Amino acid sequence: MSASHQRTLDRAAEDDALLTAAQAGDEQATTALLARQMDRVYGICASMVRDPEVAAELTQEAMLRLHTSLPGFRGECSWASWSWRVARNLCLNWRDRSREESGEDGATLPDPRGDA
């Protein structure tokens, strides 16, 4: 097993431990769990919207949604995957709203999925 793969497994195990504690009401664990995802969520948002201010706003919204969804998180995927999905969906919704508001077809906004 590569060192990189081992670090990923270790991080997932740490996330799982924090998640369990956070769902049991441990505020320090909640703070730590969310802090571990903040830079990653911002990176996702920044790469998708290509505007640092909008990315910061979407990151804040994503973190709020992650926090409020924490008690009901069922663990059907990893916490990291869930946080990625929340951030991605917020960015896609923002992109769709931006297109509708501007009347553009979205040609100037990159498709983060690479499908376009």
Image (spheres, rainbow, N blue to C red):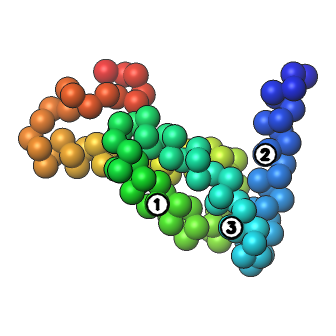
Residue at image mark 1: 60
Q: Is residue 26 left or right of residue 37?
A: right
Q: Which mark is residue 11?
A: none
Q: Nearer the viewer, mark 3 or mark 2?
A: 3
Residue at image mark 2: 12
Report which quarter residue 115 is drawn in: top left
Residue at image mark 3: 31
SS at mark 1 in the image: helix
Q: As rendered, which of 2 and 57 lies closer to the eye?
A: 57
Report which quarter residue 95 is drawn in: top left
Rounded to the nearest whole Å, what is the CA distance between mark 3 and mark 2?
16 Å
Q: Percent position (x, y) of residue 91?
A: 38, 45
N-term-proximal mark, 3 vs 2 = 2
SS at mark 3 in the image: helix
Q: Residue at x 68, y 53 (%)?
A: 36
N-term-proximal mark, 1 vs 2 = 2
Q: As rendered, which of 74 and 24 lies closer to the eye?
A: 24
Amino acid residing under circle 2 = Ala
